[in-house]
Amino acid sequence: MLGSVRRRGVRAVAGALSGEGAAWGGSAAAVIPLLPLAGPSAEGRERALSSAVAALREGGLVAVPTDTIYGVACLAQDSRALRAVYRLKGRDGAKPLAICLADVGQVHRYCKVAVPDQLLHDLLPGPVTLVLERSQTLNPDLNPFTPLVGVRVPNHWFIRELARVCAAPLALTSANISAQASSLAVTEFQELWPHLALVVDGGPIGELQKPECRLGSTVVDISVPGKFRVIRPGCALTQTVEILVKKHGLTAVS
């Protein structure tokens, strides 16, 4: 399993929930304690989780910490919310969104897997996006221009629990305007706040002054049996390639 996440104090900054993303009223924001997981704070964690679930189910966009950088999530099966993500980021409509799942076992439901299950478990949960052939279960409005989809199972308890409670895949992208630097703290994407239903603040992810902490996940296409193609080196390239080549015998292609 790749990656590890330090448990930290987390709060959720909640705005009104409406339509495809609501205005965030800074002065009226509620601060919801989320961690530690034990003791009285467990109630705060459940409040934040239920608020995020409600926001997603109402079509809202939610900013969340992951094991690499901050992301913006919506329900992958909600076509209106998908369109809102592209508008939020000013994202090229031909650039795909990844999906986030709660557990490795769910990959088979949403993808056609051409590699052994052990390979999936060797890389996930962790800072890797695996590109696979999509199944018909996924919303056809999600990346309709490609038969492939990137799959993440981050090594971060909050977003995985969020996907688990929603009982649906989350569409996930980085919390930044397209072509700008990735975000390691919620203050780095404040310009997005007015268009989000909820911001979950997990504190800084990595060291803010180190550019390598902003690389995001390593993206690898493993849709062709016996081969892999690195789409984005990301933060876990060396260990990912080692697992693919040395342990599972896959061949790199360009």
Image (tube, rainbow, N blue to C red):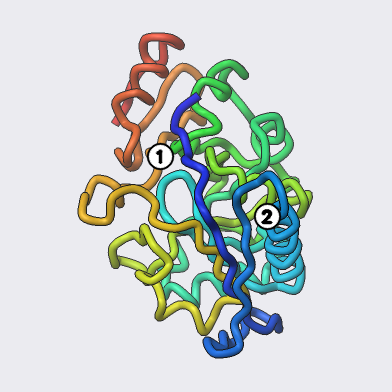
Q: Within the image, what quadrant is residue 77 found in?
A: bottom right
Q: Is residue 159 visible?
A: no
Q: Counting other residues with Cα less than 10 Å from the Cα at mark 2, is it few (<14), some (14-19), or many (20 or more)?
A: some
- x and y percent of residue 92 in the render? 41, 68
**Residue under the point 21% across and 55% down:** 209
SS of the residue at dot 2?
Answer: helix
User: Residue 161 vs residue 232: left or right?
Assistant: right
The total number of labels drawn is 2
Query: Which residue carries the number 1 mark?
Result: 219
- x and y percent of residue 104 in the render? 64, 31
Q: Which mark is residue 41?
A: 2
Which residue type does callout 1 highlight?
Answer: Val
SS of the residue at dot 1?
Answer: strand
**Residue under the point 61% across and 58% down:** 142
Choose between 251 and 21: the one closer to the eye. Answer: 21
Q: Within the image, what quadrant is residue 21 found in?
A: bottom right
Counting residues from the start of the chain, the first of labels 1 and 2 encountered is 2
**Residue under the point 58% across and 61% down:** 73
Q: Counting other residues with Cα less than 10 Å from the Cα at mark 1, is it few (<14), some (14-19), or many (20 or more)?
A: many
- x and y percent of residue 91 in the render? 42, 70
Question: Where 7 sits versus 16, above or below?
Answer: above
Q: Is residue 133 visible?
A: yes
- x and y percent of residue 17 in the render? 70, 81
**Residue under the point 24% across and 45% down:** 212
User: Residue 218 vs residue 80: left or right?
Assistant: left
Which residue type does callout 2 highlight?
Answer: Ser
Q: What is the CA distance from the residue labelled 1 to the residue labelled 2? A: 35 Å
Question: Where 23 sits versus 95, above or below?
Answer: below
Choose between 221 and 171: the one closer to the eye. Answer: 171
Between label 1 and label 2, give the one nearer the viewer: 2
